[in-house]
Structures are given as C-alpha cells and as structure tokens.
Image (spheres, rainbow, N blue to C red):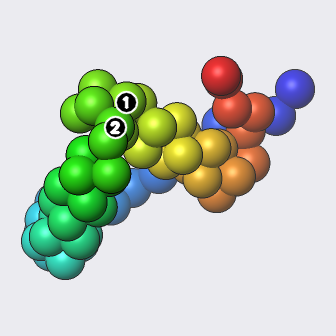
C-alpha cells in the first residue's frame, strides 16, 4: 500500500488558480447544461473526472 504524502499549496496561489479556472468551469457547466444534461449530472461528472485526475497526480487509487 502506498503512503499518501501531504500536499502544500499556499492560499494565495490557490486563490490565483481558482480565479483562472473558475470562468472556464462556469462556461463548461453552462454549455453542458445547454446540451441537455441536468446541473446535478454535470457536477457529478466533473467531480468524478477531477477525482480521477487527482488520484493520478498523487498516485493513489481512485474511488468510483
């Protein structure tokens, strides 16, 4: 079993990153909803994709 190492990110850097990501994320959500999916479906799909990417970055198994 792998040991999970801590991840440290400064508050300022995280805030800056969120400022860059948020407009594109909101556009993605709106576009996908306009394609006929519910807000819940979109947010669950995004959450699952993020969880998979996060697991790959920290090299831990993802939970589905």
Left or right of 11: which side holds 41? right
Q: Nearer the viewer, residue 49 or 1?
A: 49
Q: Residue at x 33, y 51 (%)?
A: 35
Report which residue position mark 2 lands on.
37
User: In the structure shown, which secondary structural element does the residue marked by tag 1 occupy?
Assistant: helix
Query: Could you classify mark 2 by the number of other residues whose Cα lies within 10 Å: few (under 14), some (14-19), or many (20 or more)?
Result: few
Q: Residue at x 49, y 47 (%)?
A: 50
Query: Could you classify mark 1 by the number of other residues whose Cα lies within 10 Å: few (under 14), some (14-19), or many (20 or more)?
Result: some
- Contact between labelled residues 2 and 1, with CB atoms less than 8 Å apart: yes
List x then y, in percent, for residue 29. 25, 52
Left or right of 19: which side holds 3? right
Among the 4 quarters of the image, the one containing residue 18:
bottom left
Q: Residue furthest front?
A: 36
Report which residue position mark 1 lands on.
41
Q: Residue at x 19, y 77 (%)?
A: 20
Residue 13 seen in render: no
Say above or below: 62 vs 19. above
Name the disc covering residue 28, or none. none
Q: Residue at x 46, y 37 (%)?
A: 45
* Quadrant holding the C terminus: top right
Q: CA distance from mark 1 to mark 2?
A: 6 Å
Among the 4 quarters of the image, the one containing residue 44:
top left
Q: Nearer the viewer, residue 18 or 22?
A: 22
Say above or below: 28 vs 24. above
């Amino acid at each position: 079993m792998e040991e999970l190492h801590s991840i440290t990110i400064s508050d300022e850097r995280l805030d800056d990153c969120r400022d860059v990501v948020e407009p594109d994320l909101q556009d993605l959500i709106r576009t996908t909803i306009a394609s006929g999916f519910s807000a819940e479906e979109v947010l669950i799909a995004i959450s699952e994709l993020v969880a998979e990417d996060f697991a790959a970055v920290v090299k831990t198994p993802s939970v589905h």
